[in-house]
Structure formats: C-alpha cells, structure tokens
Image (cartoon, rainbow, N blue to C red):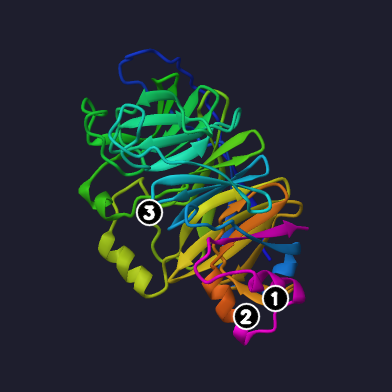
Amino acid sequence: MKKLTCIFILVLPFMISCKKNAAFQATIINDSLFQVITVNPDNIDKKEPGKISAFAEEVEYIPLQTADSILIGETTRLIVWSDLYYIWDKLSETIFCFDQDGSFRYRVNRQGNGPDEYLNIKDFTLNRENGNIMIYSDRGQAFYEYTRDGELVKKSKASFLMSSFAAKGDWKYCYLDRLPNQRLYEDIFPEAYRYVTLNDGNVCNHQLKYEYNEDFLHVPLSSDNFTYYKDKVLLTEFLHPEIYEIDSIGNLNPRYRIEFTTNAYAPSFYGSVDLKRMKEAEKEGEYTSLFGAFYENEDYLFFNYSRGLLGLAYVEKKDGSIHNPGYFLLDDFNQNTLSVILASVDEKYVYLMGEPELLKEKQKRKQFSPYLNEICEGLQEFDNPVIIRVKLK
C-alpha cells in the first residue's frame, strides 16, 4: 500500500465580481495543495483480491419497480439524494425517481419543442435545496428546472456549449471540456477556458485556460465531472486526472491529482495531444485513464480507471492507504460477482447497478446466499435494473 504524498505550492488569490453582459474576465488559478494519489494498476490487492468485504459490511439488492409505464431503457446516471434514487434514462430522455425500497415515485419527461419543453438532455442534476430536477439541453442551449410534477419553474439561456454542469444556490458551475466555444472566446481564440461559472445567469468567472487545437476533437468528451461531498462541489478533469474543490464564489481550488505509474504517456490540456503516441500507449497497456466520476466522503475516496478493462481503486482517508481491488468485485456476503463500475457514492454507501437478466443467469450457475436467491426469484429478465447498495465499514 502507498501513502498519499503532498505537494505544497503558493496560493495567490485573485477575485472578480459578476457583471451582466460583462466583458471577458478570467480568474487566475494558482495551485495550492495537491494531494497526489499514486496508483499502480498492476499492483492489485493480494490479501483478499476483489472481495467487497474489504471495505463493506453489508450488501443489499434493491429491484426497481417495473411496469409497462415504468421502463428504463438505458441508465446514464444515478443520483442518490434525500433517500431517493434519481435515474437518467438516455433512451427516453426521462428522469425517473424511486424511493429507498425501489418503489416508483415520479418521472419528469418534458421532451419536445414547446416553450416549457427541452429538446434533449445533455446533463442533469438536482436543486439540493428543494429536490427540483435541473436539466441542461445543448440542442436547446438552455437550462430547465422542473418540479416533481413536471412543472417548469425556471428556464435560463446557456450561450455556450458544455459537457457537464453542477448547481448550488444561484450558482451554476459549467465544465466546457475541449469544446472550442469560438463565439464565447472570439477575442482570444484559440485560447479558451474549460470552466465557467454563472450566477443568476451572468458569467462570473473563467478558469482552466488552454490553447485549443483540432487534435482535441479526437479526445472523448467527458461526463460525470461534478460530484458532491457534504456541502462541497468537486470538479474532476479526466484527460490529466485532477480534482478541484469549488469554493463559495465558484473558484476552483486544487484538491487531488491522480498519477498512474504505468503511463508511458500522460496527455493533458497543458500542451498538444500526441494522438499517435496516445493510441500506441493504449495498445501496449502503457496508458491508464480515469473513468467516470470521482467520489469522496468522510472516510474514503473512490474512483474507476480504464486500462483496456475497467478497474476500481479507493483510498482510506484515515491513513492515506491506497487499495486496488482491480478488475472485478466479489460480493462474498452473497457469492455474486459484481461490476466494478461505480454508480454513486454517499457518506454511508457505494452504489452499483445490476441487470436482472444477468442475475437470473448467474443464479443458475452459482450458489447464491438465501437472501439473494429470494431476490432473484422475484425478478423477470427484462425488469428495470437492480440497485446494489454496499454499506461501507
């Protein structure tokens, strides 16, 4: 096991205020304290490889209610908030809400061309003050906020393209990724920024400066860039894995940097991307990337990585120890193999997703626990997904 190492760098704060229709402004980022998480994908935990009991004390399987009118086509994101499960179904452009035992509560589906409707869902989050559904439509170039009854309570224009956003109070935090946004940055292009804050619809700040070039078009767009930890919002960048904490006025403060020891090439936004070298490194197993959201709670950090296969790593914050379960998980409480892909993490639980068809198939070949056998007996192959709730130690 390896410990987190720390890098101390001088902080020079620089602040601006929000102005309606303001000229281009930018807040300079100065690295402060980065905690560097060093992961060797080859160094898989040997003590109890893949056993979920290494960090969990219980695993529950929660089938989501299924009916002809309640069908999830493709689970794109799970948000867990206030004992409710919110699922974005990309196929139907719908947000479903289920309660803690998997019972259906409501859905928001207002896709259309009307003034109160969205053309598509590019990203979604929650208003964590009232539970309203917040949607960003890139085709509609707008944000939409709906009540649980599907009533539009607020619509605001989004005059630039982004891959992901988060919200807190009157703030919207927007991650533009490698999208060029030439209209937004026409005075300085090809220089551009990857992070923009909005307050009550007004642009306040630009951060994460880089010089755009067409090679970035071949870098996959990221999603799941924002996660929440207590009252904090975290932003994750994937091309060069860095995690920032967003302060009370929307500025970024460096928090973690993830370094993979097997990487022969480490592309970033701080220079040109050598696509040929990147592909060669991937082919040779010498390029590992962060995959999906980065999660933090009081005791742990959790994240997935990609190196041909998807792996899981986590950090115990009490001692800084880094664990690499690797490419599969065994629910040794119920004798079931699980996907390592994280769906969500909160203070008490890690959430994974299971498909009923796969569970039913494995039940025929494996000796599940009596508890999981009973769950499987109540499933049909084409039911909605099963939320796997893992209680942390």
Of residue 388 and residue 202, the one placed in the foreground of this image is: 388
User: Which range is magenta?
Assistant: 364-393
> Residue 249, how many percent across, how many down?
53, 23
Q: From the viewer's perspective, is 286 left or right of 160?
A: right
Of residue 118 and residue 327, the one placed in the foreground of this image is: 118
Check disc 3 and give the amino acid type.
Leu
Tags 2 and 1 in contact by the CB under 8 Å rule? yes
Of pointers 2 and 1, the one earlier in the residue sequence: 2
Mark 3 sits on what residue?
Answer: 91
Whether 279 is drawn above or below 226: the answer is: below
Check disc 2 and give the amino acid type.
Gln
Residue at x 57%, y 57% (from the top left corner): 303
Mark 1 sits on what residue?
Answer: 373
**Magenta includes 202?**
no
Check disc 1 and give the amino acid type.
Asn
Whether 152 is drawn above or below 88: the answer is: above
**Magenta includes 370?**
yes
Q: From the viewer's perspective, is 38 left or right of 197?
A: right
Mark 2 sits on what residue?
Answer: 363
How far separated are the C-alphas under marks 2 and 1? 7 Å
